[in-house]
Structures are given as C-alpha cells and as structure tokens.
Amino acid sequence: FINHLTELQSITADETGISIGAGVSYSQAFDVLRDEIPSLGRLIDRIGGQQVRNMGTIGGNIANGSPIGDTPPPLIALGAELTLRSHSGRRTIPLEDYFLAYGKQDRLPTEFVEKVFVPRPAEGSHFAVYKISKRRDEDISALCGAFHLVLDADGKVANIRIAFGGMAATPKRAKHVEDALLGEVWSWATVSGVRDAFAEDYQPLTDWRATADYRSLTAKNLLTRFFLETAGAPAELRRFELEEA
C-alpha cells in the first residue's frame, strides 16, 4: 500500500499532453481525462465500481501487466510513454515496449513505475476506445480495443494506431491491420478489405469471458464501428451494422 507517497499522486495537463503519476487513482484522474480526452473519461467510468476507482490506480493497472487491463490499449494507441524509476535514476520507454510476454514486463528488479505521459491527440484526429464485457458496469473486459486515426487532406490514412487487450498474451498493437490501412483512402472499401488482417496480429484464447471466435469477430466489428463513427454512416452501412449486430 503506497497511498502515502504523495509524490506519485500528481496529474498535470498542458498543450503537449497529460502526465499521470503512478499513484493517481481512477477517480482522481477522471475529471482531467474526461475534459482533455473524453473517450478515456468514458472508459474510466466503466472500470470496476466506485470503490475500486477510488483505490485503484492507472499506474497499478499498467505495472500489473495483465493482458486484459483496460488502460494499456488506449494509452498505447495514443503513443504513451512510461517512466520507470530506481535508486540509480529514471528511464522512459514507449508504453507498448513495457509488455514483453505474459507475466513479464521490462522492469528491472529495483525499478518501479513512476508515471505515464499521454500525448494529446492531434487536432482533427480521431480517437476511440471500446470496452467489451458481459456486464456494462463492474466487469472485467473480454477485450478492449482502441483506435487513433490521423487523415491527410485527401482523406487518406496518414497514421493509425490500433491496440487491443484480451486478444494476446500482452496488450498489443494490430500492426498488420495498421500497415494495410496506411496510405489508403479511409473508406468502407478499404476497411472491409482489411478486417481479416486481424488474424495475422492476434490468435486469441477461449476462456470463461469469451470464445476465441467471439473475440476475433468482435475485433473486426470494432474496426467497422470506428469507421462508421468517424466517416459517417450512409444508409447501406447502417443496414450492414444492424445485420452484423
């Protein structure tokens, strides 16, 4: 129990992004995240119950290294950086590099998570995170997907980062899907053509929360949902969404 370490409980926001100390609870972070990156605020509101959010921390969710932790996927999609500290100093790494394998993180024996820095999404970019669970409230995710998209002036994908939890042994980016989208027009033809590329990035397991087939299909459908929400939904696509649901 480290709640007495007030030095870890600072959260600050500026024009570059948000710095979150490892001891900042979900409840303490909620107002800042809701105001600065609304999708993150909505996610925080679905993590555990009020008691859990009052005690649990974003830093702890990261340091725990669970493949179904809710905060790593959106933070990875946003390009977050993690600062680790020990008696010999500090080092900062991309958050996605912290997760090495199931139960293994890039943290030396004397190191602890000090803070995470979340870059502010660029103006005009699109960001969303979707938590999928059996219950809406107070439930562990079957999977959690996050998408961060930047389009150029021609409507082509200039940059995209997609990250999922619950789809692999660690929180992990869908780099094959990203590569297939990069440079392409953000259209239904493009998106529908890359949905199957998720199979190259993830081979999920079946457990009591969801089957592997359910997780794989849901990941594809979340990409479709993100497209519908960012590009508008013509009538034919709305019909597709209803048929898939």
Image (spheres, rainbow, N blue to C red):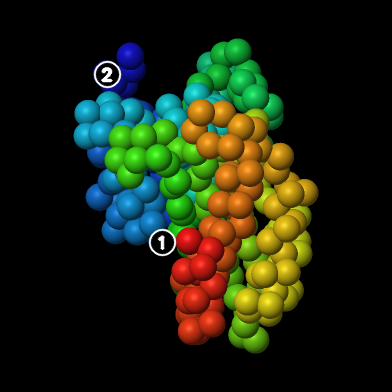
Question: Looking at the image, can residue 125 be seen?
Answer: no
Query: Which residue is rendered at x = 29% and y = 58% of the image?
Result: 35
Q: Residues within 10 Å of mark 1 (few under 14, many from 20)?
A: few
Given the image, on which type of amino acid does mark 1 rest?
Glu
Q: Does dot 1 land on a helix, a strand or a loop?
A: loop
| Alpha carbon separation for disc pair 1 and 2 | 30 Å
Of the 4 image quadrants, the one containing the N terminus is: top left
Please tell me whether residue 89 is drawn above or below residue 195 in the rendered image. Answer: above
Query: Which residue is rendered at x = 48% and y = 84% of the image?
Result: 235
- Which residue is identified by label 1? 15
Say which of 203 and 230 sits in front.
203
- Percent coordinates x, y for residue 145 in the rendering: 53, 50
Query: Which residue is rendered at x = 68% and y = 77% of the image?
Result: 189
Query: Which residue is rendered at x = 56% and y = 40% of the image?
Result: 165
- Percent coordinates x, y for residue 179 in the rendering: 75, 61
Question: Looking at the image, can residue 181 be seen?
Answer: yes
- Which residue is identified by label 2? 4
Please tell me whether residue 20 is drawn above or below residue 240 in the rendered image. Answer: above
